[in-house]
Image (cartoon, grey):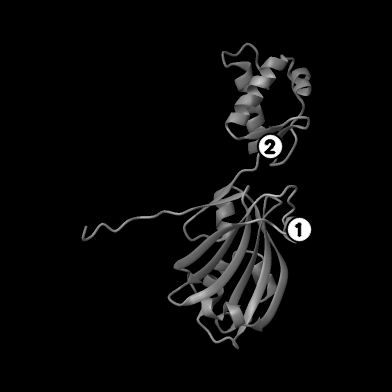
Amino acid sequence: MIDKKSPIPVYFQLMNYIKDEIKTKKLKPGDLLPSEREYCERFNISRMTVRQALKELEREGIIKRERGRGSFIASYPIEQEGIMSFTEIAQKEGLVATTRVLEFTREKAKNCAKFLNIDEQEDVIKATRLRIADGIPVALETVYLWEKKVPSINMDKLTGSLHRVLREDYGINITKSKLTFSAIFPTLELMKTLDMKETIPLLKIESVYYREEPVYYEVSFYRSDLFKVTVNLTKNLKGE
């Protein structure tokens, strides 16, 4: 609550109040904040004080203000750094990860054979999964697994971390990955699947994950407002 006798400025107290509501998930990304007048009446403070608090929250990237619509909780980016499953990434950020399997089929490798280093006529498991964090769709990914490496895998096993399933059920530890990034504009179908309210670029990531040999190939579409990838690069200075 707001304590007007406190030496802490009232606008700063209001900022912390709003931050606490975000931290406790009473307010989530995309939620509309109460109006300036509502805050004034709730805490018996001036509109100037409320505006100062909102201005500072906007400067910190915590909220975004839209003329004629009000102030909204900004989307927080989920960050991947290194080889991590989506489940691990979400848990690192303190989010609840869920997965909805939209497609689970067996088909010939064909075009993905070159990524898995197998014959085009080998059978692969194709699984398309919607990855969700705290109830918000973040990514749509399609995974191709060589069936011989994952016998008896089923749809239920793919509702969580694929890395965990590979490790615990098949003794396969992922040790390396090769990723290719590109930015694309979403189709109407992708916008609907990812519950996008406006057209923003998607981050398309094509990945091959390895133990020593390729384990699986994946094509993913991430919402650029909700996800970012950090890549650490080093230069070998030997011989220079």
Tell me the tag on residue 73.
2
Q: Residue 50 lies in what quarter of the image? A: top right
Q: Residues within 10 Å of mark 1 (few under 14, many from 20)?
A: few
The N terminus sits in image quarter: top right
Between 230 and 133, the residue placed more toward the observer is: 230
Measuring 71% from the left and 50% from the top, which residue is drawn there? 199
Instruction: Give the mark nearer the N terminus: 1 vs 2.
Output: 2
In whole angstroms, how far apart are the C-alphas of marks 1 and 2?
25 Å
Residue 111, position in %: x, y? 60, 79
Circle 2 packing at 10 Å, graded few (<14), some (14-19), many (20+), is many
Give the residue at mark 1. Answer: 188
Q: Secondary structure at mark 2?
A: strand
At 64% from the left and 23% from the top, the residue drawn is 53
Q: Is residue 219 visible?
A: yes
Please state which of residues 21 and 108 is positioned toward the viewer in this rendering.
Answer: 108
Q: Is residue 153 visible?
A: no
Which amino acid, mark 2? Ile
- The percent coordinates of residue 2 (x first, y second) are 67, 19
The amino acid sitting under disc 1 is Leu
